[in-house]
Image (spheres, helix red, strand yellow):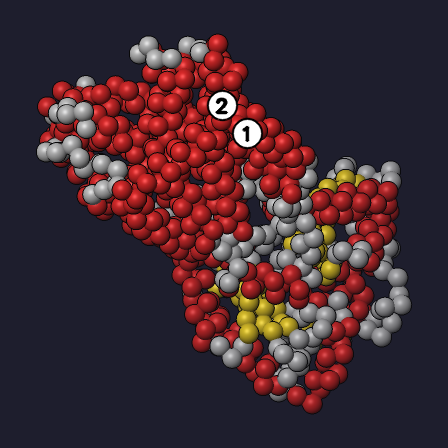
Amino acid sequence: MIEKLLKYRYIYIVILILLVVFAAIKAPNIEVDTDISQFFHEDDADYTFYQDMKSEFSSQDNLILLGVKHQDSVFNLEFLNKIEALADSLKQIPNIKKVNSLLTLSYPIKSMFGIIGVPYLKIEDSGKLAYNKKKILGDELPKSFINRQGDALFLWIETEPNLETKPLDKLIGDINALRTDYGELTTFLWGREVIDVSFKNILIKEILTFSFWISIFLCLSLIFIFKKPAAILFPIVLVVVVIILFLGGMVTLGRPISTMSNLFPTIILIVAVSDVIHLCIKYDIEAKKGLSSKQATKNALSEIGFTTLITSFTTAVGFLVLYMSPMQAMRNFGVESAILVILTFVLTLIFLPIFFSGLKKGNLFTISKPFTALSTKLFKKLDLIYKYQNTVLVGFAVVLALSCYGMTLISTNGSHYSFPEKTDLYSSYKFFENNFGGSRTFELVLSSKNEKKLNEPELLETVYAIDNYLAEHPNLNDVKSPVNYYQIMSQAYYPNTYKERPLPLDIKTIKKYEKQLASLLKKDYLANKNRTIFKFNAQMKDFGKHDIDAIHTDILAHVNSLIANKPIEARLSGIDMLIDISQEKSIENTFFGLLIAIIIVSITLGIVYKNLALGILAVFLNLIPLIITAGIMGFFKVDLRAEIALIFTVGFVIAVDDTIHLLSKFQWERKKGGSVDYAIKTAVLECGKAILATSIILVGGFFILMSSGSLEIFILGLLVGLIVIITLFVDLVLAPIVILKWFKKFL
């Protein structure tokens, strides 16, 4: 293999250069997919129902909400003039169809000419502001345009439907630029499209930031580990080449990267650095024996090359099991990460030997004095620790027992949204959470079971009862439903007594109201054309998943009791509920996938080692860091979310890598005729340096993620960094003791 690599090395290098140039041209065109639908399972019954309902009602996907806060009251002439100017400016932005606000809102009244609309506010008639304020805050219709305190207005921006990525990005950018121009107004932007675009911009910024700091940290770490600064050349070039080829390849295949791509720089670090450091340190050991570069390369590859193949395979499997997740985003992340792993391994296996062969002297990867001093001190401490085997075992047993208890304390009652703090998106989330009745949307859909219209008297009475119940529910705010239509028409016909009058149940009045509504309603977001499906919308606070589930269950049970034996089906729906369901299913599938990965890795190691005891030991050692980390999560009340559940998959593949290197070296020495004591001591001394070096880099790489404004990424970086530290102690402290004390006779 070495001979063929060296014989055709210039061809390989030219091919790589051409591919990198091609990919570098393509890479800047990479797209980031932040579409919320990628977090849903396409085959899920609730998602199918949601999609079916979207076709029944006018779409709300192209609505953007702009909130404007006043320090005192919005009923201020100067403030309202600025709002009017802002609305006029918004209408000039391309792809904005309409801007509705309190200034454009009218209430219907019956006149000699029929039903006409009367504006709630007329800026030119400033003398009536006090009267207008009382009516606006007392009526139902304006509740979507002003908060209860009267110090915040909401502008509803309707955009062209189904905008492509670039026009949508520009539209959001233009709105934000306009917000800057109106800096004297305190504004906040919300909506599904706003969240998607804002999150994408945050994601791109974090990818660039993480890549920069991880590269800096990698350079400094390699300079600390190796004696000569030139030793950083291949690892850095490898990381850069992998990133360019990956991004260029994704563009060529027409695939965007997923919303979790800010982890990619660290994943590349995991694979590239681990394999390269193990091979470089082994090459240095062989070169110091006086061997030629070619022979030292051969020896390094023959001993470690196959091990790196196994570690890359197990790492790829660990990520590929994420494909079992119901979330498209998680599936994409798993596949893309596996591609990165394979690509990195192939490039390392081909070009690192070529790089080695070009070295005139074999001392490029000589370990530096500071790192030698650190590792020597560590090994001396290990020799001391090995004398207290029982104490170590008891200590780990106690920690594991506490961790198992801590696992029972893990909560999944996380908040619905988790945005990076100190961002405009987070500020908007807090504003709408506190001023708009909550950032979550509640949706209840009533469907007629026999195609009977829900506005027929015998069914409409039940609909009224449901509306009253929801309107009085303490956890629901600004409830909107088709009942509002009849309330508005009743107000139009009976402006002075409508609050005391019961809503109509006679067919004649209902038909009259429906006829008037047909001429007034240009878009119906709450009822289908046939009036066989009604939708109830409301705002909710982001209480936490468990509390929301309890509220949903209670509401649905009460609604069904009101329906009794009427031919009506009640069902909860909406994007926010779908996200909750997807989060729960994704966590379940992540752990099921982890179990599959553990089984596959166990079988693989059993086949590779041809020793059942060694395979069992490897799996046992790899589970310890995960159990301890899960215990830490429980004790420190870290909520388990789908994104945070990734720590167990990522942590497992990291733990497996170092353990495989250690046990493979142990088995290599045993095959050479060494005793168990000698083999484990040699494995710790030789692999221990590489494991220590990779652990330093990986801990730093994951701790860099703690600079993220996203709580999930912060926690993931912290906990995976802890997994790396725990794995280091397990491999260098616990593994040798367990082998010598319990597994000696089986190995």
Circle on res. 737 = 2
* Residue hosting label 1: 392
Q: N-terminal of the two: label 1 or label 2?
A: 1
Q: Determine whether, in the image, residue 583 is placed left or right of residue 306.
A: right
Report the quarter where the C terminus lies.
Answer: top left
Q: Where residue 239 appears, x then y in whole percent?
A: 29, 41
Residue visible at 86% across and 42% down?
Answer: 561
Residue visible at 70% across and 67% down?
Answer: 143
Q: What residue type is labelled 2?
A: Ile
Residue visible at 26% across and 41% down?
Answer: 368
Q: Where residue 740 appears, x then y in whole percent?
A: 48, 18
Instruction: Give yes or no for contact between labels 1 and 2 (Cβ–Cβ under 8 Å).
Output: yes
**How many numbered discs?**
2
Vertical comparison of 305 with 438: above or below: above
Q: In which quarter of the image is residue 185?
A: bottom right
Specify few, some or many for label 1: CA neighbours under 10 Å numbering under 14, 14-19, or 20 or more.
some
Q: Is mark 1 on a helix, strand or loop?
A: helix
Furthest toward the bottom, the residue is 127
Q: Nearer the viewer, residue 541 or 671?
A: 671
Q: Where residue 505 appears, x then y in whole percent?
A: 86, 55
Q: In which quarter of the image is residue 484?
A: bottom right
